[in-house]
Image: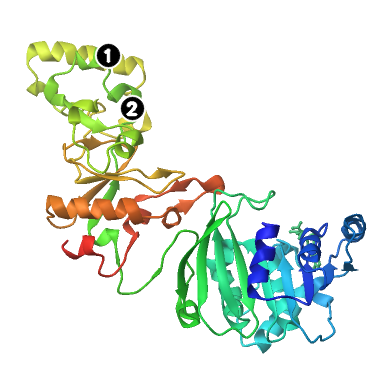
Amino acid sequence: MVDLMVEKVALMGSPDRVIDAGAGTGRYALAAARRWPKAEIIAVEMDPILASAIKSNAKAAGVKITVICDDYLNVTLPAIRGTTAFIGNPPYLRHHDLPAKSKEWYSSHMKAMGLHASQLAGLQVYFFLKSALLGHPGDIGCFITSAEWMETGYGAGLRSLFCQMGGSQLTRIDPVMQVFQDALTTSVIASWETGHQGEVVVEDLVGQKASTSYRVSKDWLAAAPKWPGFGRALPLDQPTGLSLGDFFRITRGQVTGMNEVWVATPETASLIPERYLVPCVTGAREIIDSGGVLWDRSKLHRVVDLPANLAELTASERKGVDRFLKLARERGADATYIAAHRKPWWHVGLKAAPSVIMTYMGRRPPVFARNACGAAVINVAHALYPTKPMQVRELDAIVGWLNNNVRVDEGRTYGGGLVKFEPKEAMRIRIPKGSSAFVAA
Ligand SMILES: C[S@@+](CC[C@H](N)C(=O)[O-])C[C@H]1O[C@@H](n2cnc3c(N)ncnc32)[C@H](O)[C@@H]1O
């Protein structure tokens, strides 16, 4: 990441002076000293032990680094003729841990710049502000931070500051990459060129590879209530935009209370009349492997879905079912929370087969399949019911689009990159205006 950021700075300009803000052991300063041997390299580090480590590291590497052991917020820099580059990994210190003096400093300078200063902003935001105050037209910068500020209410101040200080690029990092060893958080590299008025390039970084996603104007960024995280495309919140919920009602698959009892085995299936054994999606794999259409119900497991009133069974059917119910009781299937709250306890009550079924949890975007075989679905997946009649070819076009375009960050990302789409989040999946798959529908 250090090398990648040094190269980002090199693409913006050739610095005559480099400031490593919050330098730790001086990794950025050392990389900068090697990359720009003629530049003046300054490492700012408040911790005296780390500051002296930077000196030793510079000596060992045979490079010259000026170490300032002080609070970055106190630093002053003499004016120079050339370009100053700011680089680093600002400290991630939450607002609770910041002294009142620093908070006052932050509020008064933000106010003077006409920006809103949330009291919830952390030290990393202060580092941006300080760099903006130290910078002159033509200076450049590149910080890696946690990406929270792009999407949270208290990040609004930094979002406006980033635009005002000449933000030029946002590199959103794949949440699977754990950049900060001590924090499970998604991260972003924010680059700026002081005085830059143009568009901001928004890109994604997967491994060492960046893909340019799009360019966006500062006007759009200024108006957006939040900025899209990794993998998310614009427009994020276009008021006229449509979402998947405009086309489908999305619900969880049926909760059985005890899948190992209600999903029939060959033994239990032999006790149940065929008409109460309902082919069902019982594993995400079935959707993932379907290639977008679930054709064959014979490959699916079957769920025991007995009627509420067992009087509709013949006497011989009743014998088998009673044996099954006895087995189910022995395994506690009558006493689960779900069973205790449905009447009678054996009536799983599968819902009608949905038109489309989707996976909702994984380290990848959700996978969608048209339900051509009329399978029911249990709570391993979500069920999508069109809000108005749709033709098969329309459903196929929509499923194809969803499988190619829904990105992980539209769901809720957990540490380590696990992504979950609750039905509500799935209904909020943005459909770009005029997407041909949805136009017919
Ligand atoms: C996230 S670490 C980054 C270290 C280094 N850049 C790296 O990536 O290895 C942030 C560093 O900032 C230092 N720091 C914290 N508050 C500071 C402040 N107000 N002024 C200067 N340095 C500070 C910490 O001691 C820590 O070494």
Q: Residue 69 appears at what percent x and percent y?
A: 89, 67
Category of crowding for the residue at label 1, using alpha-carbon neighbours closer than 10 angstroms: few (below 14), some (14–19), many (at least 20):
some
Rendered image: mark on residue 279: none
Q: Residue 2 appears at what percent x and percent y?
A: 70, 58
The residue that mark 2 highlights is 259
State which tag comes first along the sequence, 1 or 2. Answer: 2
- The amino acid on which the numbered mark 2 sits, given as a three-letter code, is Asn
Nearer-the-camera pick, 251 or 360 = 360
Q: Are marks 1 and 2 in contact (CB under 8 Å)?
A: no
- The amino acid on which the numbered mark 1 sits, given as a three-letter code, is Lys
* Left or right of 389 in this view: 322: right
Category of crowding for the residue at label 2, using alpha-carbon neighbours closer than 10 angstroms: few (below 14), some (14–19), many (at least 20):
some
Q: Residue at x 69, y 62 (%)?
A: 94
The residue that mark 1 highlights is 326
* Image region (quadrant) for ligand 1: bottom right
Nearer-the-camera pick, 441 or 338 = 441
Q: Residue 325 appears at what percent x and percent y?
A: 25, 17
Residue 123, by quadrant, is bottom right
Q: How many marks?
A: 2
3D distance between C-alphas at marks 1 and 2: 16 Å
Q: Residue at x 52, y 83 (%)?
A: 198
